[in-house]
Amino acid sequence: MFDAARRFFAERAVLEVDTPLLSRTTVSDPHIESVASTLGRKPGRSYFLQTSPEFFMKRLLCAGYPDIYQICKAFRDGEAGRRHSPEFTLVEWYRRSFSMRQIMEETVAFIAALIEPRRTTTPPGFIEYRDAFGRYADVDPQQSPVDALAEAAGADRRMIQSLGEDRDAWLDLLLTMRVVPQFATGGLTVLYHYPASQAALARLCPTDSALADRFEVFYGDLELANGFVELGDANEQARRFERDRSLRRQRDQPVHSADRRLIAALQAGLPECAGVAVGFDRLLMIDGMSQDIRQVQSFAFDEDDA
């Protein structure tokens, strides 16, 4: 499968790159926790294993690199189970001047090139986030009040107290409980145009600023990929970093310094591009018809050994 991945990119003249796994900075996303480390030469200074090569790869693009990809290890704290591992393999790539549709279709083509054709019994489906919520949860993610989202989720008092008025938290819950479980079990579903509040590092949709040019790909209910038409506005990216940091403070999560080198690179200019990260281990799960990520890793993470 590594060979198939590299052939896929070689046929499209996409350059393979290599970026650091260890860095002084890390992501600000409140939904992701980084693995921290220290070095003997710098006591008291924290370093982080990267949750994805995204920041470094964007800096390469700003420096003038062409289309690029990378197959690498990534690390996330607090993620261990049947579908998650603290250490996993990502395939991430960036395509200059690609539209939303182009990067979504290429992601589907990449997945199809790596897994056995017999594993997909239905053609890929493309559905907008708003349409999916209307069809499978009978709510409008943009217009329905939080009470309606809670009711659609079948929330009890404890859940209501926990999530409160956090609209995105309710949408995430509904996505997990009501929407994704109804995706076609034998094929790929591409969910796109997430709400602007969940843009992460994606640009806002040029024709509707309430939406983000962000998409995810699922095989049944298993998430495989997360992609964006990339945000190139350095000032907006800095604002999003600060918003994330503020939210982390409110939640009593560790608050990390914003990546100033990424902001500086964006100020120098990120070419118009789209990017996506695909979980390689999960592709192996599909290809091997496995329900546990540990069964497809040569040396699986075992919490009992920690």
Image (cartoon, rainbow, N blue to C red):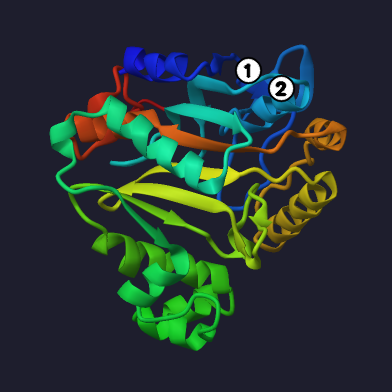
Residue type pointed to by label 2 = Leu
Which residue is found at the position 77% from the left and 48% from the top?
237
Which residue is found at the position 45% from the left and 43% from the top?
104
The total number of labels drawn is 2
Is residue 25 rendered to the left or right of residue 179?
A: right
Instruction: State the image coordinates of residue 262 (x, y, percent, origin top left).
Output: 78, 33
Which residue is found at the position 55% from the left and 77% from the top?
142
Front-most of residues 221 and 15: 15
* Quarter residue 150 falls in: bottom left
Residue type pointed to by label 1 = Thr
Task: Determine which of the numbered discs, if any, sits on residue 40 in the image.
Answer: none
Front-most of residues 159 and 261: 261
Q: Quadrant of the N terminus?
A: top left
Callout 1: helix, strand or loop? Answer: loop
Of badges 1 and 2, nearer the viewer stands 2
Is residue 99 rendered to the left or right of residue 292?
A: right
Which badge, 1 or 2, is on the more N-terminal residue? 1
Instruction: State the image coordinates of residue 114 (x, y, percent, origin top left).
Output: 29, 26
Instruction: State the image coordinates of residue 72 (x, y, percent, origin top left).
Output: 49, 20
Instruction: State the image coordinates of residue 296 (x, y, percent, origin top left).
Output: 25, 25
Callout 2: helix, strand or loop? Answer: helix
Front-most of residues 150 and 80: 150
Note whether residue 93 is visible.
yes
Q: Residues within 10 Å of mark 2 (few under 14, many from 20)?
A: some
Q: Residue under label 1, please give it.
A: 19
Contact flag, marks 1 and 2 (Cβ < 8 Å): yes
Q: Quadrant of the C terminus?
A: top left
Q: Residue under label 2, please give it.
A: 60
Mark 1 to mark 2 CA distance (whole Å): 9 Å
